[in-house]
Structure formats: structure tokens, C-alpha cells
Amino acid sequence: MKAIELDKAYNPKEFEDRIYEMWMKGNYFSPDNPRVEKNKPHYVIVIPPPNVTGVLHLGHGLNNSLQDILIRYHRMLGEPTLWVPGTDHAGIATQNVVEKRLRAQGLDRHKLGREKFLEETWKVKEEHHTVIRRQLMKIGSSCDWSRERFTMDEGLSRAVREVFVRLYEKGLVYRGNYLVNWCPSCGTALSDDEVEYREVHGRMYLFRYPFAAGEADGFIQIATTRPETMLGDTAVAVHPDDERYRKLVGKRLKLPLTDREIPVIADSYVDMSFGTGAVKVTPAHDPNDRDMGIRHQLDVINILNPDGTLNENVPEAYRGLSTKEARKRVVRDLEAAGLFVEAKDHVHQVGHCYRCGTVIEPYLSEQWFVKMRPLAEQALEAWKSGQVVFFPKRWENTYTHWLEGIRDWCISRQLWWGHRIPVWYCDDCKEPIVSREDPIACPKCGSAKLEQDTDVLDTWFSSWLWPFSTLGWPEDSDDLKRFFPTTTLVTAYDIIFFWVARMIMSSMEFMGRAPFRDIYITSLIRDKQGRKMSKSLGNGIDPLEVVDRFGADALKFTLSFLSAQGQDILIDMESFSLGSRFCNKIWNATRFLLMNLEGRNLLRFEEIELTDIDRWIYHRFNETVATVHHNMESYRFDDISRVCYEFFWNDFCDWYIEANKLPLSGEDEREKDRAISLLIYLLEETLRLLHPFLPFLTEEIYQKLPPFLPVVQPPISARPASIMISHYPLVDSARENVRAAALFGSVQEAVRLVRTMRSEFTVPPGQRVRVHLKTEPGFEAASFLAGHRDLMELLMTASEVTFSESGPSAPGSIPVVGTGFEAYVFIREVIDVNEQVAKLTREIEKSGGALTAVERKLANPSFVAKADEAIVAKEREKKAELERKIAKMTDYIRELQT
RNA sequence: GGGUGCUUAGCUCAGUGGGAGAGCGCCUGCCUUACAAGCAGGAUGUCACAGGUUCAAAUCCUGUAGCGCCCACCA
């Protein structure tokens, strides 16, 4: 046959897009693709939906690369495999993006109005969605695009409503006036999990509150980090057992800067040992104070507007000020009144909005909540009973800890972008109506004047239904029946609370079982300094740029290779050359093999008799396959990538192809046919092994292979049209061959020893050298070595290799010791002995000089006594090393001169 | 404060009871007719520190230090 020609270098741009198109046309991403073996269990992943706030970053690159590896692996095992793609509307985050754009045009959402604003947001959603979809395709994601979903799709919105109504009917959704986390900038409530605590260097202020006239003399000192909230104080609390204050409990204080009087109360919440042992109580603006307020029926004075400025409940002078301004003003005024004691630097944790970074204010408002305890119990049960398993396991602690300390979930958001809360209020009788369908009239009074709740739901209220809402729930759809529960969830650890735990809760509640079996928690990607990649730092890496420079396969393979369990990945653009080099290596090895098809006839595998070298490579291949399968079970992507890399590069290329250059360049036509046939067969199997990690490259090469090439394992004569739907290699115990491995291991050892020797004497690579191998009596590999004289000559660049159980007959060689043999290298013949002796002599002299210096140092008693012990030890070691070196070179000289 | 992870070669990291390793970088020599994105060879480590268990410890236990992350209402 004719040689098949490949370009000289790996150039992914030339084929990646073309191949993705081919896959799409072939409908290979479908769970009903031609490879499917109907009796096998389903393998299903639903994508963690990227937010439509922007485009994909490298974290998504990692996440989706790993999902694609799993999907392709299982698909090639013949399992009906489905990967559901989709995106998330990301309520608050997307709304912020749009508002930012509006601000740039001098607009805001209120000027625009709700309807127009939503129109704008849908446009932004479309923009980002288009890019995200293209990015996923670019990196080769083999997801089923016909099943793509969006959290605000009609179907998913129906699921959201259904869930809200069911939970309401069950009494698990309730509405109430509670202290919630309020972001003054976003103008909405947040759940506890959306508050990010950051260390802030603030101040701790000490103030005096004087007693009201006639109550007692003097004052009580209180400490606070938020002076402005004193305007909302309705009590001062002390511990009931605190002797210092016992007599003062019940007395009234005059609240400075206001005309109000507040009581001193006793509450065991107060820590006597902290500060002055007296705490100001602001029920409207602190969760603990709120609790105390309820216990003591204190007044609740809300001093804030929704935008974070002070409202009409404070004295006029402070109204309209921001909390920051008010703080300064209050401190100044208290100082003027002689009530300020001191302000100390104070480091503490302050809550910030996870989306915009604004300081969170505890704020009393009417909100909707989900009662979580009953749901959390079920989610804990799912884990305890082994329905879900975390990889790595230690994330289970994070999961259970959160569930055990679960708090109710505030799900209403004062935003516009999201699922409108399915509650209407009757204008006439004020009855709230919770309904799956938009109601027309009030069921209680019949009034048609209904208004829907203006708030929307937390974005996670739709994401937590993702594994079944995407499959058609609440309809009893075919997909739901076929593909639920899913198999594996691949996600990062930063959303275990937000998403993973909640999905399990909702799924237990509405589906009666966990939504997936395995939870693989990926690493987080950081830059080389260990910083999170972010737009503001400008240290982000665009996956598309990686694809552009190195190719999608290089992206995928590199990330997989670096993806050690439980470790963050520190990476920069250059890191991807690892994958790209590997691709190039595979490309060129293939190029070499296909080139050697010129004039050859491919032999059928059955008619080839394997040599021990062939058995060795099949043994190694089989070992590699076993490791891959084994580690795939436990999601050890790094280990899998490593063994594949090592097998292909070190075993297949460096030894097997190199060894086969002998027959390939020989005269024996039958030998040539034999050698190239086996090489091509093994290449084909290896490509299948590598395909999940290097989908584009392996497909491109697969398509270049001789079209009629049969498959060795499993034995099929008509290869599938695409490697995507070919068979993944399986462990074949018949290929295990420890004996062949040992035999070839001896060849490798002998070759390496001689190469090292050559290198030590700087013998030019082209210069042939004579070698004698003295094998020990009874050494098993002796005849194998002797039988591969020509191979060793090739690999050692030897002019001649002789064998015997005795030493060399002629002098002038230098021996090296191997396992079961000694190799005598006749260095003297290929080098200028005088020059080499002179070189060695010079080195001995040089080392001798260094040795003298070291010895002198060590002979100095004050050095040994006073110098750092480590330094002394180092010197001793240096001495021993120099002595060894000198002895070895002296030996060499003696041998050369014999 | 609670939890959890890390500390191994210049850098990024594997390795969890018996030989200290990989990739990149570095040094030497090679354009050997697949690949210079390559080939052959090499150097580099008190495996954070201190104790303990063991015939044997980078690996198990205890403690210490440093770094990181998560959670938590100390005003």
C-alpha cells in the first residue's frame, strides 16, 4: 500500500472545528447514538449550568473538560450516555451586569421600568449564551445540544412554580417579617450563604450612656463597632449574674443624641468578661439583639432605608446620611457631648455581598423563607445511606456540617430578573393566593383586583431543581424516566452549600431519591501566585485563547494531568505546552508509522507470531489500560493522564518504535509487514485509550488510518465511522506477560548503562563503540539478550556486542554492573586515549585541589566546633564525594592505559 | 473559636510503611532519515520542625511552627 502523509507538525486549528461538525452530523452526542448497547446502564451528567453573566473562564474549562472525559469514556464503553447542557439566569449577578451597563449610559433600572429592563436583560442573556455555547463546542464538549436548557425556560419555570406551591402547601414555605441580610447597593435581601465574611480593620468605640433623671447616678459604658446603630437602640443589656450591674437592672438610661429613654435589661446572652459587660441592644439591626428584643418585648426601631441611608426614625440631623457618614457624625456628636471615651483599632469579620462586595446590613423586612430542617434531614439521610458519595471523601464533612447547622432559607429577592414569586394579593380582602396558574379572581372574595408579589425568587431556587427539571419534571417525561437519577456531578467545592446540598434536598423531597450517585469535587484554578483568577486582577486565562494557542486537546489533557484530588491548580498560559507537546509527539509518531506503510501489506493480526518484545509492549499496554479503568472509578484524572502519557511516550515511542526501526529499515519484506502491522494495530488501540482525553487529535488520526484496518480488540472487521463511538480498550488477561516484561527490562537496563557510560566519556552519539556482555550463569535473560544482538547494537550505537559468561578477551574496556550481567564498554578504541587521560587527569587534579581545601577546613578544630553543624556535615559529605570521584577516575585511567 | 487541608528538587506538584519521583526549568552532547514542541545523558532534596511507634517512617501517632480555605452572633 501507499504511505499516508501527515503534516510535519501538529496543527489543531486545521481539524478541530471540522471534526466537531462531523460529530454533530453523526448525532454521536445522543444517548441513542449507534454505539449504544441497550442492556447497559445509563451514564448521565447534567452540566453545572454556567451563569449568563459572562463568558466561560478556565474553571469552566476544567470542569467541562473533566465531564467530557467521563462522558466519552462511558460512551465508548457502550453505555447509553447523556450529558445535558444548559445555562443559569443567575438572578442578582446578571441583574448587576445589566445595571452596570445602564449606569454607563447614565440610566438605571427604575428610569427604564421593569418591562424594558427585562428586555435588556434577555438581550444580555442571549449575547452571553451564544458565546458560552460556542466556547463549550470549541473545547470539544460532547453534550447533547438537542436537550439544552435554561433556568428560565418555560419548562423549568413550571418546575419552579410547582415546587414553590408544593412547599407552601406542605407548610415549608412561609412569609414573615424577619431580620435578613440586606445589600443596600443591590437593594435586596440575601440568604445567609450569600454573605461573604471578610476581615475588616475597623474600630471599637467606647461610649457612655447616662442614666435618665432620677434613675441613678452616672452612666453605663458600652462598646460598639457600629456607633450609628445607637440611634436605634432600645435597651442596654447586662448579664443577670453580673454584680457590677445587678442594682441597675430595670433603671432607665437616657439615650444620647435622642430624646428617648431606654431600659437596662438582664440577659444571659451577655458575656460578662467582654468589654464593659454591658451591651447596647438594637433589635432592628443585629440578629442577637433581635433575639433579646423578642425575649424582653423591646421596641424595634428600624433606622435604615432600603438604600442604606438613615430614615425618619432618627433625629433630623442624621436623616439621609449613609451609615458611613452617620458613623462619623455620631462619634463627633458624642464627643462633643462628653460621652465619648475612646476608639481602639479592632479587627473583625464583616459581612459583604457576594455579588457586589457592599457591606451587608441586617435589615428587618417582609420576606419569603423555606423551612429547611425537614429537607436537610432527608439530605443527610441520602448521604448516610450511601446514595451519594463524595470524591474526595473529605468534602462530606463540609456537607454534613452545613446540613446539621441548617438555617431557614430566605428565597425572596427584591430584584426584577428571575422567577416571579407565584403569589398574588387580593386588593380587596388582602388574601394571599399561592397558585400554579395565574389566578383571575380571589377565591375568597371573588375580587379580580389581584396583584402579583413584586419580588423574584433566589436564583438557586431554580438551580436546585436542575437534575430533574432539565429532564422534564414536573411532567412525567420519557427523559425523566430514562435518565433520572443521573450518575455523576462534577463541580467545584465553592458551591457545595449553594447548589450540591440543595439539589440533594429538593431531589429527595420531590423525586424521592438522590439526584446523582457520585459527586466529584474539582480543584479550583488559580494563578501561579495562588490567587483566584478574576477580572479585576486581570490574571484570568481565557479558555478560548488556550484553544487558539495550543488546541482544545492540549487544554483538556493539561488540566486533567494537573488535576490532583483536593489540590488547587496553580497554572499559567505556558503550562499548556505540556499537553501540546504530548499532542505533537502523538502526531509525529503517527506520521512516522503511516510513512512506513509505503510498499507494505498489512497482515491480519491472527497470522502474526508475536516476539517477546511485542509481548512486552502488549503487557505494558494492558497494564496501562487496567490503571485507566481502575482510576476512572475513583476520578483520579491525574493518575490516568500520567500513565497514558508515560505509556505512549516512554514505552511506545522511546522503546517500541525505536526497537522496530530495525525490522522497518531491514531487507526482510515479511518482517517489515509484520512490524508495521503490529505498530498500526497498537496505535489504533492506543488512540482509543487516549480518546476521552484527546478527542480531536485521536479522531483526526483515526480518520487517517488505512480505512480497511480491522480492530484487534474487540475483534471487529468494520471499524466504526468515528473513534467516538468505537470500543474503549478493555483489560485482557491473555496479554499479561511478566516474563516478557523482565526480558525486555534487561535489554533496557543494559542499553541505559552503556548510554550513561558513553555520555560520561563524551563519546559522540554517532560514534560506534564495542561492548561485551558478561552474563552470570543461570541468568534468565542471557539468551534473550544474545538473541537480540543487533537490537542492542542499534540502541547502544555499538559496532559489536559480544556475549559470554566470562569477561572480555581483550583489555581496554570499562565495566558497569547490571542485574545478572556486566557490560564492558571498549571506550579506549573510540576516544583519543591520551586526550581522555589528560582530561581525566585534569579533573582529578581539580577535584584533588577541592579535596585538599575541604580537608584543611575539617582539620581546623575551631571550624568543626564553631561552625553550624549542617555546614560541617556538608563539608564531610563533600569530602567523601570527592574521594569517590577521584577513585573512579583513577580506575578509568588505569583501564584506559591497560 | 470550630473544622479542614497543605509544607517533598529552582517552579508546579505526584507519592501514604520497605528502592525519593514527574513535568517544566537548569547543565552536557547531538539537526541519529517521526518529532529541536525532539533525542541521549546529568546535576539538584536534613521529604517544615521535635518527639514517639516499628526490624523499617516522606508515609502511622503526638506535639510545634508557617501558609491556605470553610464555618461561627463575641458587642
Image (spheres, coloured by chain):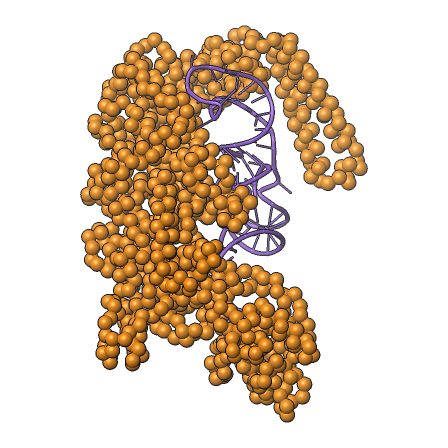
Chain colours: A orange, B purple
From the viewer's side, name the closer residue of A768 and A676. A676
The image shows residue A134 at horizontal and vertical percentages of: 35, 42
In the rendered image, the quadrant that contains the N terminus of chain A is top left
In the rendered image, the quadrant that contains the C terminus of chain A is top right
Query: Is residue A201 placed above or below B45 in the rendered structure?
Result: below
From the viewer's side, name the closer residue of A79 and A51. A51
> At 54% from the left edge and 11% from the top edge, which residue is drawn?
A826
* Number of numbered discs visible in the structure rendering: 0
Is residue A500 at all visible to an observer of this figure?
no
The image shows residue A392 at horizontal and vertical percentages of: 42, 50
> At 68% from the left edge and 15% from the top edge, which residue is drawn?
A841
> At 48% from the left edge and 65% from the top edge, which residue is drawn?
A183
Q: Is A237 left, or right, of A295 in this rendering?
A: right
Q: Residue furthest bottom?
A: A214
The image shows residue A633 at horizontal and vertical percentages of: 35, 44
Q: Is A16 left, or right, of A32 in this rendering?
A: right
Is residue A294 at all visible to an observer of this figure?
yes
> At 35% from the left edge and 39% from the top edge, which residue is drawn?
A140
The image shows residue A888 at horizontal and vertical percentages of: 63, 20
From the viewer's side, name the closer residue of B52 and A63. A63
Query: Is residue B55 placed above or below A470 in the rendered structure?
Result: above
Quarter of the image holding residue A712? top left
From the viewer's side, name the closer residue of A727 and A854. A727
Q: Is A401 left, or right, of A667 in this rendering?
A: right
